[in-house]
Each structure stands twice: as C-alpha cells, then as structure tokens.
Amino acid sequence: SFGKADDATRIRGDVLWRITPVHRMRFMYFDNSQTRSKVLENDVQWGDYTFNSGSRAEFKTDFQVFELAYEYAFVRRPTYEVAASLGVHYMDMKLQLSGTASGIDANGNPFQGQASTKVSSLPAPLPVIGLRGGWVVAPDWYVDAQAQFFRVKVGAYDGNWSDLRLGATWMFHRNYGVGLGYNRFATKVDVDKNDFNGSLKLDYSGLQA
C-alpha cells in the first residue's frame, strides 16, 4: 500500500572476540528503520482499525536484530581459515501506522474519521547456524565471506532467516584496516498470536563500508 520508503536508515555492527586461536565469540547488531508517507488510494484495515482512503497516512517500521554466536575454526592455516558458528538471534519488529481512521478503540467504543495511531510489535528469538571464511590474498589484503541460515517452526512462529556477506579489507596498519563489502539480509516469519497474526517478509541488500 505504501511502496518504497521515503526515508531509510540501516546500521550494522559486528564484534569478534578471539578467545583462543580457534575459539571465538561474535556479536552482531542490525537496525533497519524506514518511514513511508502517502495519500491512501484504498482503505487499509489493521485489526480493529480502518485507515480511510483519500487521507494521508504515515507508516513506520523499526526492525532490529541482536545475535550472539560461538565460532570454532575447524580449518586454520597461515593464509586462510574456515569457522563454523552456532548461536541465537533475537529479532524485534515494530510497525506503526498513523492517519485518519475508523474502528473500535481500546475501551470498546466505536469511532469515525479521527486521527489515530496503531502499533504492533513482533519479538521472535530464533537459533542460527553459519560458516565464515577468511583468506589473505596479499600481505595487506584479505577477503572474508560469511553465510548464516536457519529455518524453524516453534509454537506460534514458523520462519526462516539468512544473512550473506562478502567483503575485502585493506590493512593499512598492523591493527587497523578499511574495507568494502556486500550484504544480503532476509527474514520471513509467519506468526499466529493475539498481538500479531500474519506474515512478515523483509529483504535488504546493499554495499557496506
């Protein structure tokens, strides 16, 4: 109903702690916040609210992921390594729609054509497995690739998750480097709960500095 976002902000951060040469812990944070605003061509129904066609509405999404994983480097050589990972990620999706609506308020009273805001939140903890590899292609350059995937059906949740990343880094100093990469991040989950009943699909891909 809203098309592409008018404004979007995406942030990703990864931290890797090498406990020993082959044992590591990794933490990842991802945030994808978007805002869309337009005059509705048709009525949009959301639960007990109906946002009226012909009125301007604003739709906000805030998608956050926190991941903690253990890595084991089962192949480790002077110029390359391959590591397997197992962890858990916590996804939280918040959806907010504001505009002129009709429906039933929290007290059970009907209302017609008034400014309203409807918020729905979807928290979902899911396990994740993956592979990560690194290759030193030159004394000051290395390439790294990462793939994570999981599909699970537990209780009210039925979903899958994938995170693919490829990057190259130039180490201009022994302890510091700059890099460029490409990241594709996708999740799909079907939920059957009182506070969220439906399907959510989110895909993101783009360059990463």
Image: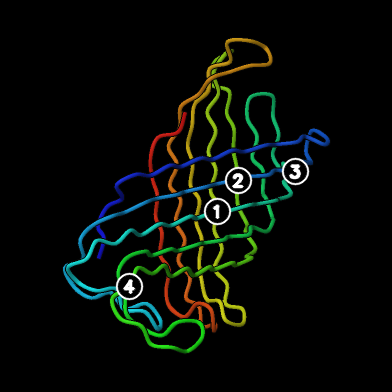
Secondary structure, mark 2, is: strand
Judged left or right of residue 151, residue 21 is right
Query: Which callout, 1 or 4, points at the residue further toward the start of the chain?
Result: 1
Q: Mark 2 vs mark 1: which is more N-terminal?
A: 2
What residue sits 36% from the left and 59% below the top? Answer: 59
According to the picture, the residue beneath numbered tag 1 turns out to be 64
What's the residue type where badge 3 is placed? Answer: Met
**Circle 2 residue:** 29
**Amino acid beneath label 4:** Gln
Q: Residue 153 or 132: which is nearer the viewer? A: 153
Q: Earlier in the sequence, mark 3 or mark 4?
A: 3
Residue topped by disc 4:
114
User: Marks 1/3: CA distance?
Assistant: 20 Å
Q: Amino acid at mark 2?
A: Tyr
Real-space CA distance between mark 1 and mark 4, rounded to the nearest whole angstrom: 31 Å
Q: How many marks?
A: 4
- The residue shown at (67%, 37%) is 15
The nearer-to-camera label among 3 and 2 is: 2
Residue 23 as seen in the image, left or right of residue 171 = right
